[in-house]
């Protein structure tokens, strides 16, 4: 079968964002759109010929079509062996694990993560390198440059492969192996956590609800929680992955995970509640009538990780993205280990994990993970929580208040203004940046600005610099406001405003976060003029 060379012309919108190239399905399904991007990956990744590559996606609408295009192109581009998740499905952390376990050259992951799916929803493709993690910016920049020059791509003429049958076939000179998407991942989890103890906790009547939001984690959660850990059938809600996520917005937050929130705030709530997102890398943690912020979750998990067998030797360091609250820094300080502050995007953790400088990483955007893979990992976070709960034998609410009493509480909230006019959002950020030198000393009520900057990160391992990563305003009392535009949306712009205030006094630690932060929320609006510029009276989503 000779490769077919197809002539093409560049698309001018193939610049990867925070995590790969995310676009509406209508954009992705244009002729040559997937092929141009994938050929650009193959062109840029020197040495990929003859190697093993992993392919899988979150199963959303257009996954099946895109994966067949990629398989044919992989054969034409001389890939030696392609590992494909059964049905074309692999959760993002499972794909990271497969890349590492099989020492693959890299992987192509089809996912738009927490973005909505279906014909009118979003689709995405990203490239992960041999360490299992998202490609760093120098590679995504090179891929983007290539998309602007491309004139042809290579494919083979062949019928669609049957992706539902496990085992090996050949396409042209390339071996294609269809692998079980769940087994390796479930084994990895079993190697990190005390399944015996968690099983005993379930046997003792512990109840939990896991909402898979009709997305990719359903089969993983059912296998691990119900089959291996003995949680009763029905523990996993919405456990069948559907191409349109059954109409769910697969973003695990208090707004979109409504079935979970209803269960956890209704009569006789379970002891523990959790949800994951479209591709299985995010997590949401709840207790009865309690939402644990991702920032707090990272801090509590860091303080208790040694209770799980995989982390009993202790942590080497803790890394968090800049907008994530500083709660984890307090734990790092107490443990006497380094704490790192990186830009938003899991790709920035890769070097720290590879160099053995950090063990746990987390982001306010519902991502937590460790050095077991190179992606954030929703079910991993849930299992570490279960391990901690099983060993400590205390309700989650008590663990949270105990943590705040010991370390103080970082009240935290994120306000998202979704789908605002791009020009308005860009102007708001440009004016904020321009105002940075004038902000220090400026008074707001009984406080004033201590410092303000645009976050810049120098990677301590390779020295690469990422600038313009978000505007930070620190007030005299240490409170902080961060402004940045989302890099994962596909329509208009999303302004994210992150606010936090530290409360050391135990008497003040049990308030509602929105109420405790109301003064800071008002200051954040005054500094940036959010309401007057966007015309929005309130954020679209509050987490
Ligand atoms: C992606 C990245 C995360 C990042 C998040 C937020 O998450 O993988 O590391 O924190 O985007 O992005 P933004 O604030 O730019 O929208 P996911 O789960 O969408 O892959």
Image (spheres, helix red, strand yellow):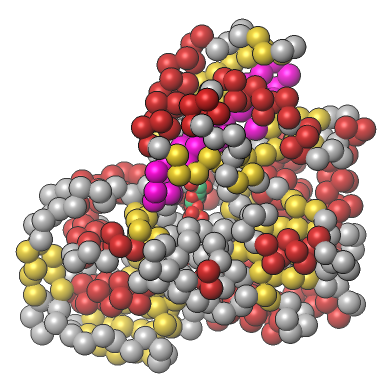
Image quadrant in which you'd find residue 412: top right
Q: What percent of the width, then of the height, locates residue 334?
A: 77, 37
Q: Is residue 225 above or below residue 357?
A: below
Relative side of 428 to 125, left or right: right
Q: Is residue 442 above or below residue 335?
A: above
Residue drawn at x 83%, y 49% is 400
Q: What percent of the width, then of the height, locates residue 265?
A: 81, 60
**Quadrant that contains the N terminus:** bottom left
Q: 44 or 396, which lies in front?
A: 396
Q: 186 or 431, which lies in front?
A: 431
Residue 406 appearing in the image: no
Residue drawn at x 45%, y 65% is 117
Residue 320 lies within the magenta run: no
Residue 487 lies within the magenta run: yes
Q: What percent of the width, then of the height, locates residue 463?
A: 40, 34
Query: What stretch of residues is rendered in magenta?
Result: 474-499
Q: 508 or 74, which lies in front?
A: 508
Residue 435 appearing in the image: yes
Residue drawn at x 28%, y 78% is 68
Relative side of 191 to 482, left or right: right
Q: What percent of the width, then of the height, locates residue 128?
A: 38, 59
Residue drawn at x 21%, y 57% is 40
Image quadrant in which you'd find residue 222: bottom right
Relative side of 460 to 307, left or right: left
Residue reaching furthest right? 507
Marker count (numbered): 0
């Amino acid at each position: 079968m000779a490769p077919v060379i197809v002539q093409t012309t560049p698309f001018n919108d193939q610049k990867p964002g925070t995590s790969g190239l995310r676009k509406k399905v209508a954009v992705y399904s244009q002729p040559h759109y997937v092929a141009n991007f994938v050929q650009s990956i193959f062109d840029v990744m020197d040495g990929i010929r003859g190697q093993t590559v992993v392919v899988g996606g979150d199963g959303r609408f257009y996954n099946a079509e895109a994966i067949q295009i990629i398989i044919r192109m992989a054969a034409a581009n001389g890939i030696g062996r392609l590992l494909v998740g059964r049905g074309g499905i692999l959760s993002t952390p499972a794909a990271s694990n497969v890349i590492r376990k099989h020492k693959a050259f890299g992987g192509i992951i089809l996912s738009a993560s927490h973005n909505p799916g279906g014909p009118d929803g979003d689709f995405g493709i990203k490239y992960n390198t041999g360490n299992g993690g998202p490609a760093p910016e120098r590679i995504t920049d090179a891929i983007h440059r290539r998309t602007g020059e491309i004139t042809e791509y290579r494919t083979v003429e062949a019928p669609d492969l049957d992706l539902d049958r496990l085992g090996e076939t050949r396409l042209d000179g390339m071996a294609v192996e269809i692998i079980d998407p769940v087994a390796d991942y479930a084994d990895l989890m079993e190697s990190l956590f005390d399944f015996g103890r968690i099983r005993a906790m379930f046997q003792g009547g512990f109840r939990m609800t896991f909402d898979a939001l009709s997305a990719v984690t359903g089969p993983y959660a059912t296998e691990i929680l119900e089959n291996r850990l003995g949680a009763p059938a029905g523990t996993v809600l919405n456990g069948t992955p559907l191409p349109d996520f059954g109409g769910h917005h697969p973003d695990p937050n208090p707004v979109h995970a409504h079935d979970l929130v209803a269960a956890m705030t209704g009569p006789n709530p379970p002891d523990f509640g959790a949800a994951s997102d479209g591709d299985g890398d995010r997590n949401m943690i709840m207790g009865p009538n309690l939402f644990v912020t991702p920032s707090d979750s990272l801090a509590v998990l860091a303080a208790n990780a040694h209770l799980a067998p995989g982390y009993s030797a202790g942590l080497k360091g803790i890394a968090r993205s800049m907008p994530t609250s500083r709660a984890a820094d307090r734990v790092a300080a107490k443990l006497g280990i380094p704490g790192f502050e990186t830009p938003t995007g899991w790709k920035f953790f890769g070097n720290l994990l590879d160099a053995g400088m950090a063990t746990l990483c987390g982001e306010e955007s519902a991502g937590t993970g460790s050095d077991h893979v190179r992606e954030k990992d929703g079910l991993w976070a849930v299992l570490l929580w279960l391990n901690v709960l099983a060993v400590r034998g205390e309700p989650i609410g008590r663990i949270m208040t105990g943590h705040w009493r010991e370390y103080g509480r970082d009240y935290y909230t994120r306000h998202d203004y979704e789908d605002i006019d791009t020009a308005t959002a860009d102007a708001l950020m440009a004016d904020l940046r321009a105002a940075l030198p004038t902000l220090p000393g400026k008074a707001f009520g009984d406080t004033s600005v201590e410092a303000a900057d645009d976050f810049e990160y120098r990677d301590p391992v390779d020295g690469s610099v990422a600038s313009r990563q978000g505007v930070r305003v620190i007030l005299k009392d240490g409170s902080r406001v961060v402004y940045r535009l989302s890099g994962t949306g596909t329509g208009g712009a999303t302004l994210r405003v992150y606010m936090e205030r530290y409360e050391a006094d135990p008497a003040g630690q049990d308030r509602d976060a929105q109420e405790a932060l109301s003064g800071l929320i008002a200051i954040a609006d005054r500094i940036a003029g959010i309401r007057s510029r966007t015309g929005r009276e309130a954020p679209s989503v509050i987490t």
